[in-house]
Amino acid sequence: MEFSDNRIAVRFEYEWHDDSGQWYRSYGNEMWEFDSNGLMQKRFASINDLPIREEDRKLR
């Protein structure tokens, strides 16, 4: 597959915990735009962090 444009959009979801052990599920959308050298020149992101219980994790 060939790509000739300089933009990509992604939807993501991941889980993590802070130093106190509180778990979160983070999810959202991002759009990246690259310059002619392949370096990111713009990044737009919408990220939501949802506190969850450890037993409610679905990504392991």
Image (tube, rainbow, N blue to C red):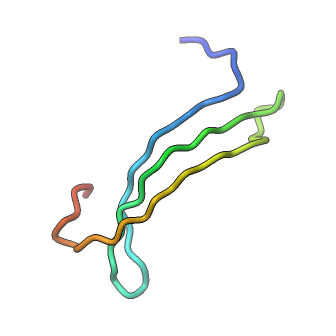
Q: Decide which of 20, 48 is in the foreground and name it.
A: 48
Q: Which residue occupies the foreground of this view, 24 or 38?
A: 24
Residue 11 appears left or right of 30: left
How many labels were placed on the picture? 0
In the current view of this chain or complex, which residue is farthest to the bottom? 20
For the point 18% across and 66% down, the residue is 56
Residue 35 rendering spot, x and y as whole percentages: 81, 32
Q: Locate the C terminus and report the quarter of the image it occupies.
A: bottom left
Give the quarter of the image for residue 53: bottom left
In the rendered image, the residue lying farthest to the left is 55
Give the residue drawn at x 42%, y 79%: 18
Q: Is residue 16 above or below residue 4?
A: below
Q: Residue at x 22, y 73 (%)?
A: 54
The image quadrant of residue 15 is bottom left
Give the image location of residue 38, x and y in percent: 76, 32
Q: Is residue 14 above or below residue 40?
A: below
Rendering coords of residue 40 (x, y %): 74, 41
In this view, the residue farthest toward the right is 36
Q: Position of residue 7 (x, y in %)?
A: 66, 28
Tell me what residue is drawn at x 65 percent, y 46 percent.
Answer: 44
In the image, residue 6 above or below residue 43: above
Nearer to the camera, 20 or 11: 11
**Vertical placement of 25 versus 46: above or below?**
below
